[in-house]
Amino acid sequence: MESRPVFNDYGATHGAHNPGYMPSAPSTPAMSGGPAAPSAPPAGFYDTVPGYEGTLAGGGGFLPPPIPSAPLPAPDNLPAQPNWNITSITEEGAREAFVSFSSSKCCYSSAPARDGVITKMEPFNTYRYRLETFTETRSTEWSQEPYTGQPVDAFIQPAPAPWAIATQTPSFFQDQTQNIRVPYTSSLKNCHVCLGMGRKPCKDCAGSGNKVCWVCNGSGFRHGTDHCTHCNGRGRENCNWCHGHGSRECDTCQGKRQLLVFITLKIQWTTTKNDYVADQSSGLKSENLNQVTGRAMFTDSQHMLYPVMGFPDPTLNQASERLIREHQSKYFQTSRILQQRHTIELIPITLVHYAWKGKSYHFYVFGNENTVYTDNYPAKCCCSVM
């Protein structure tokens, strides 16, 4: 009777890094020899750094900024404006914008825009107030990276306070993020994931380095007494994931066994913008104005703004006061206000009435871009792509 190969012969080429492993029964998976490695650092893994006691792995929250020393600027009335209105679009300009609009729609005939008779044009100039606040926010978190010889400087001297670390502020109203390694917080720790071994048991083969042959299901034979050619009759094969080692390089320390642990300071410069559009009776919804520009009638930029005063529309004055108060009270707690800017734009809106084939229709032309909006275009067709 032909004998089956013994494990010693198998071990020479399959699972060679685990020569002491005895294969389990085909129906029983091999088990790793130790407990699962921890995925989170144990208590006391991170040092206590004065001034950074609330820092956590994955983010320690926002750090309150120093109390601002600059007072609010004295109120200034708006500069004198010769005219708070602008000339409405001409009939020729309105038709040109309408024709361009219809041409941009694949299912619109240009005939109504080209041949319709304009019967009436109503201007509805609208004011838009915009407040922008440019802030700096700082937060900290514990970070780690494989140790490859980087400087270890923890406690050589006190770490600088989070808001005392100097940075290069970007241009105002230009959003940006910067990460800085806090000096004198870098320390060396054994990797908590692989317990300083540099490798972890392979999950695919449970640390054995080999698995039951999938062709012969561990029997070593395929047909009768024919040896399985896939595993050479051994019944088991090397694990493809760990190449027979039974373990794989630790992803956290990348096989270095040690981690450099340090505090990262995250600095975010962010522009917050809020608009207020004065009431207008044209019937055009305010959201249509979001993508257009108007004529800048007033602009002011300072560290801290005072609300607009003396504008002809009192609701705009009230909106300015409300928005500035909201911005300043909100960001005093979590951020440092670096600059504020507010503008007043006059957005031209013209409601154009026209007749085509004996019926009346209308469209809007608005913004410096002469954007067109209509919800009742009379000549549409259904297009299909074959």
Image (tube, grey):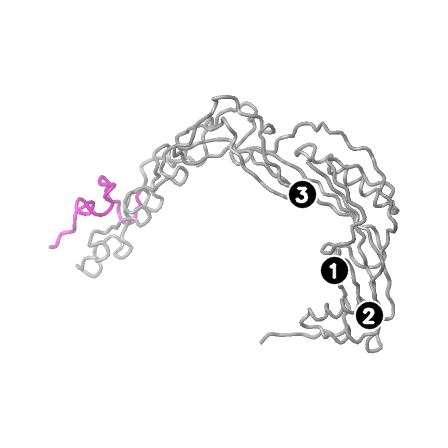
Q: CA distance from mark 2 to mark 1?
A: 22 Å
Q: Which segment is the magenta one?
A: 1-30
Q: Position of residue 260 (x, y in %)?
A: 43, 32
Q: Nearer the viewer, residue 120 or 61?
A: 120
Q: Quadrant of residue 16?
A: top left
Q: Circle 2 sits in a helix, a strand or a loop, which is it?
A: strand
Query: Residue at 77% of width from left, 37% of height from top?
Result: 305
- Tell me the number on the disc at residue 173: 3
Is 24 within the magenta?
A: yes
Q: Which residue is mark 2?
A: 361
Query: Residue at 76% of width from left, 70% of height from top?
Result: 377
Q: Amino acid at mark 1?
A: Glu
Quick one: label 3, few (<14), some, or many (20+) residues within 10 Å? Answer: some
Q: CA distance from mark 3 to mark 1?
A: 24 Å
Q: Amino acid at mark 2?
A: Tyr
Q: Circle 1 sits in a helix, a strand or a loop, which is it?
A: loop
Q: Which residue is mark 1?
A: 369
Q: Earlier in the sequence, mark 3 or mark 1?
A: 3
Q: Earlier in the sequence, mark 2 or mark 1?
A: 2
Q: Position of residue 138 (x, y in %)?
A: 60, 34
Q: Position of residue 264 (x, y in %)?
A: 52, 33
Is 8 within the magenta?
A: yes
Q: CA distance from mark 2 to mark 3?
A: 43 Å
Horizontal side of 160 relative to 121 (left or right) equals left
Q: Name the residue furthest left.
A: 1
Q: Quadrant of residue 306?
A: top right
Quick one: label 1, few (<14), some, or many (20+) residues within 10 Å? Answer: few
Horizontal side of 263 relative to 268 (left or right) equals left
Q: Amino acid at mark 3?
A: Phe
Q: Earlier in the sequence, mark 2 or mark 3?
A: 3
- Closer to the eye: label 2 or 3: 3
Q: Circle 3 sits in a helix, a strand or a loop, which is it?
A: loop
